Image (cartoon, rainbow, N blue to C red):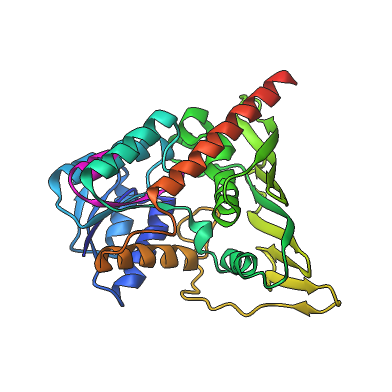
Amino acid sequence: MNVGLIGCGGMGTTHNLSLKALSAKMDVEVTALADCRPEFLKKASIQWPNARLYQTGMELLEAETLDSVHICLPSYLHTEHALAAMDKGMNVFIEKPVCLREEEAERLLESQSRNGVQVMVGQVVRSFDEYRYLKECFDTGRFGELKSITMQRISGDAAWGYEDWFHEEGKSGSVVLDLHVHDLDFLRYMLGEPDSFDVRATAFSSGMINQIFTTYEFGKVFAITEGIWDISSALPFEASFHACFENASVVYKGREEKPLTVYKTGGQIEHPELHREHNVIDDTAGINISNLGPYYTEIKYFIQCLQEGTPIEVAPLEEGIKSVRQGILEWKRAKEYVNKR
């Protein structure tokens, strides 16, 4: 299976390392790489010395015939590259958020239907072991019904983007579509569509939303989320959740040595043993995530679906778009809230 990688920066490096690890076990090879920065392109090509190199993603897509392409570009470039890839009959793995606007969502769905290709969105939280454990507890009723859940995704200011694209709201979708979208996507994955939601927010001095609190009701389940790009770039990243079931609380704190804990009604405390498919820590991507395991898992699943001819069910295009649509609604409410203050 011949793969192209467009974008060799932070997220592209994560994909590149995961694909290299997978190539030792699966019939997959990155045969084309693209990035406008020569130093990043050179670094990525170390893993694939025979890969053809391109300065832009569009040049790669025009010249190559590939089984699939991974799009790891800034968010505002996702749609145009995904459309070009699908029009050439390539299957696409596209990083989140899959797009930023409703008109882009419609074009992506139409193109996939017309071209009959597979598209997966990098909503990677669906592949984190701790979140998979939480969903399994919910699906099986292991600890009774879920009553409430709080989720946090805290990061220092996103200072690593090429040409500072994170701080242009129209290019990143603010903290809402770049960071918070992970938690809202997982809530949708586990609980379905919210019956109602309410938003509070803060903004940088530029007016861009940098912190969002959203409360949801999913049937009988009440949920609260916080996503923030802190004013300081030095604040360490941490994701966490606290899920209150009838008979236990499941707590995840991403920076702890034992991050997942179950507190049972009888006072017992357990740390579930999770099977780590690819337990590798690598900081060379230069972003706020260093655990390659979940990326390895989601990309492996994508490759397996393509090789076996089975539909993508974990994070297909339509799911990524539904999460973006929910994010857009929350983003608008966040802007309205900030502008009224």
Q: Position of residue 179 (x, y in %)?
A: 56, 45
In this view of the protein, can residue 231 be seen by the observer?
Answer: no
Q: Is residue 59 left or right of residue 297?
A: left
Instruction: Please give the name of the residue rendered at 52% of the width and 30% of the height, measured from the top-left corner.
Output: 169
Up/down of 85 relative to 338, above or below: below
Looking at the image, is 208 positioned above or below residue 264?
A: above
Q: Is residue 283 left or right of residue 77?
A: right
**Image quadrant where one finds the N terminus:** bottom left
Q: Quadrant of residue 157?
A: top right
**Res. 144 image quadrant:** bottom right
Relative to 209, say whether 90 is above or below: below
- Considering only vertical position in the picture, is 25 above or below 53? below
Residue drawn where x is 55% and y is 54% of the image: 288
Query: Magenta residues?
Result: 83-97
- Front one among 317 and 192: 192
* Residue 95 in picture, x, y percent from top left: 41, 49
Q: Quadrant of the C terminus?
A: top right
Q: Nearer the viewer, residue 177 or 287?
A: 177
